[in-house]
Amino acid sequence: MKAIGFTESRSITDEQSLLEISLDRPEPGPRDLLVKVSAVSLNPVDVKVRQRAAVQTQLAEPRILGFDAVGEVVAVGQDVSLFKVGDRVFYAGDISRPGSNAEFQLVDERIVGHKPTQLSIEEAAALPLTSLTAWEALFDRLSIQTEEGKNKTILIIGGAGGVGSIAIQLAKQVGKLNVIATASRSETEQWVKELGADTVVNHHQLVEDVKAQGIEQVDYIFNTADTYNHWEAMVQLIKPQGGIVGIVESKEPINLSQLQGKSASFHWELMFTRPMFNTLDMVQQHHILQQISKLTDEGIIRSTLTETMNGLNVDTFKLAHQKIESGKMIGKLVVTY
């Protein structure tokens, strides 16, 4: 089979930054699905892994990138019970296994969902990683109850990005929260409003903008952007006994003691934790994706697809990586094969 990967961490403009690789088609383990991939979406983690996994070294075996995927199950392991050959599926994968930038991929059935029937493969491919991240952050880490509402407010920093775009919808439609989202350009402001944000503020003057809306503090904060540079603002804006969740590692230490007086909590969310550590509740990701599939088929939440490219080749993926690295993406970019 053909795949796209890398052996060295190079600038994306370097001729050898991504490579076309020929590999044997893999055989499924006991709980694996073998999926013929038809579409994938790009995420910041694709760029991070490419930039960091082989700095000043060369990997002995090429690393295959890619996390989000949509495809058809073509073979199953002996212990598989949730899917059958011929099922159309979507998933975000496992960072410790070969990725989806390939014709075929193995994935554990416990982190896979049935593809939404009402969405195209492109629309569905945009959803898994961001949906899992947003769902786990809101409902597992912050323990927000569905239909919680009750005049509670969440601030979503980085509202127009891939995760923020889903988090706005889930917080509004499932959690029934009052949603404040950050955006700093006219096009991103319009985007987050379309997704359901009640209020839009500029992350460059976060405290001032939130307070200008007559809101002194918020019950929850979901930071999908820069943990370190927004830390002081989050400390000021979180309510006593409120909760903050972040998905971006801090470039410098943060002072958790600043939250002690408010008895406020801080949580990390990494979507790969469950599959990476084979946690006892790993199948929860299957259940979350089934929920996302149902919500999209019912029209309660929408795909965040904004751009589509085509081709399982180096040139296509180099361009896709450049777009992600620009930091200007709104929503999600998908590549079809």
Image (cartoon, helix red, strand yellow):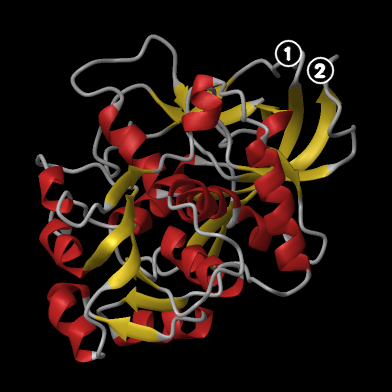
Compare marks 2 and 1 and give the one earlier in the sequence.
1
Looking at this view, name the residue that lies furthest to the top.
60
What amino acid is at disc 1?
Gly
Q: Is residue 230 visible?
A: yes
Nearest the viewer among 105 and 60 is 105
Q: Are marks 2 and 1 in contact (CB under 8 Å)?
A: yes
Which residue is label 2 attached to?
77
What amino acid is at disc 2?
Gly
**In the image, 258: left or right of 292?**
left
The image shows residue 225 at horizontal and vertical percentages of 28, 57
Label 2: how many Cα within 10 Å (few below 14, some 14–19, many 20+): some
46 vs 105: above or below: below
Which residue is label 1 attached to?
29
Instruction: Kindly identify the residue that appears in the image at 48 percent across and 64 percent down.
Output: 167
Instruction: Kindly identify the residue that appears in the image at 86 percent across and 41 percent down.
Output: 87
The image shows residue 71 at horizontal and vertical percentages of 74, 43
Instruction: Kindly identify the residue that appears in the image at 53 percent across and 30 percent down.
Output: 274
Q: Is residue 121 visible?
A: no
**In the image, 77: left or right of 189?**
right
| Element at label 1 | loop
